[in-house]
Amino acid sequence: MLKSHSAPNLPQPEAASEVASHLLEECRMVLPGIQALFGFQLIAVFNNKFGEMPEAHQTLHLLAIVFVTISIAFVMTPAAYHRQAHQFAISRTFVQLSSLLLLLSMILLSVGICLDVYVVCALITGSDAISLMVALAAALLFALLWFVFPRCIRNP
């Protein structure tokens, strides 16, 4: 039996093509959720009750839609970039740019979701203070799970 000299649970370097494949798969996993959220955001605007909402809440919902729209653009950019700029090659620049765009899309997505959480909570509770606390709690949860947690557990 052969013994491995590498430490257990340490990630092994991957070829650029494998890294790019994982990255594009991550984008594919995130996109349907973003698109579903976007659809629900658009439907809300056409609901009769939307016009009865305070103008400030309508504006926050619009801002949430804008953030989610930009998030969609960011998460779809790596595939469009690869297909048009370097169809038959994977570069370190592509992987770094795509990773950055995916992370930026997640930041914008979390902001958009938190804005809509605030609006929905304000409509249900009638309290701006409670709504702000709930939206900030959601923002904290996203920050911890999506950005702090992965950095804390990654291997050196």
Image (cartoon, rainbow, N blue to C red):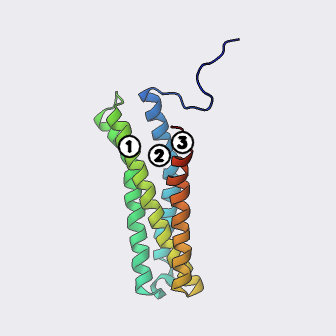
Residue under the image location 28 percent in, 36 percent down: 85
Label 3: which secondary element:
loop
Residue 9 figure quarter: top right
Name the outermost residue toward the left: 85
Q: Can you identify the residue that label 1 sits on?
A: 98
**In the picture shown, does residue 133 fall above or below 138?**
below
Q: Nearer the viewer, residue 88 or 131?
A: 131
Q: Nearer the viewer, residue 1 or 31?
A: 1
Residue 59 spot, x, y in % from top left: 39, 78
Q: Nearer the viewer, residue 87 or 91?
A: 91
Q: Residues within 10 Å of mark 2 (few under 14, many from 20)?
A: many
The CA span between labels 3 and 1 is 20 Å
Q: Residues within 10 Å of mark 3 (few under 14, many from 20)?
A: few
Residue under the image location 62 percent in, 18 percent down: 4
- Looking at the rendered image, the disc whose residue lies closer to the viewer, 3 or 2, is 3
Residue 36 spot, x, y in % from top left: 52, 60
Please name the amino acid that badge 1 sits on. Answer: Ser
The CA span between labels 1 and 2 is 9 Å
Q: How many marks?
A: 3
Label 2: which secondary element:
helix
> Which dot marks residue 154?
3
Q: Are marks 3 and 2 in contact (CB under 8 Å)?
A: no
Residue 107 spot, x, y in % from top left: 43, 58
Q: Are marks 3 and 1 in contact (CB under 8 Å)?
A: no
Please name the amino acid that badge 3 sits on. Answer: Arg
**In the picture shown, does residue 64 fall above or below 104?**
below
- Looking at the rendered image, the disc whose residue lies closer to the viewer, 3 or 1, is 3
Name the outermost residue toward the top: 1
Label 1: which secondary element:
helix
Horizontal side of 120 relative to 59 (left or right) equals right
Q: Are marks 1 and 2 in contact (CB under 8 Å)?
A: yes
Q: Can you identify the residue that label 2 sits on?
A: 27
